[in-house]
Amino acid sequence: MSLQELLSKSAPGEQIDSAVEDFLLDLADDFVDSVTSFACKLAAHRRSDSLQIKDIKAHLERCWNLALPGPEGDGLQELKRRADAHSHKRRKYDLRRAGNLNRASAQGDDC
């Protein structure tokens, strides 16, 4: 099915410029190439010889912010943020803030 046929079914009477159609087709090709390439890297990281839905789903959710329907417990939990990430960020923020306060007091700046 061509893009023009899809447009005629979804919005009868509308036309699309050939340059726009070419751009959209190139964009779609780049998207598919990007997703499959990264998903294959995830599969290789799992030491798997086959690409699975969870590889594609993980890439789309993490890099494109696309939530796909399906069971949540399909092995993606290892890719989710660890629970202690927030406390680690908080400690880094506190250390940076303390370092900035120490520098400011050493320079004699009063806020």
Image (cartoon, helix red, strand yellow):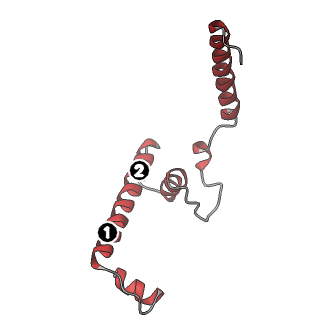
Asked whether residue 1 appears in the rendered view, the answer is no
Identity of the amino acid at label 2? Phe
> What mark, if any, has residue 38 been given in the picture?
2
The image shows residue 41 at horizontal and vertical percentages of 40, 46
Asked whether residue 40 appears in the rendered view, the answer is yes
Q: Residues within 10 Å of mark 2 (few under 14, many from 20)?
A: some
Q: Nearer the viewer, residue 97 or 62?
A: 97
Left or right: residue 65 compared with residue 83 = left
Front of the two marks 2 and 1: 1
Q: Which residue is mark 1?
A: 23
Identity of the amino acid at label 1? Phe
The image shows residue 47 at horizontal and vertical percentages of 43, 43
Q: Residue at x 44, y 89 (%)?
A: 9
Query: For numbered disc 1, what is the local secondary structure?
Result: helix
> Contact (CB < 8 A) between labels 2 and 1?
no
The quarter in which the N terminus is drawn is bottom left
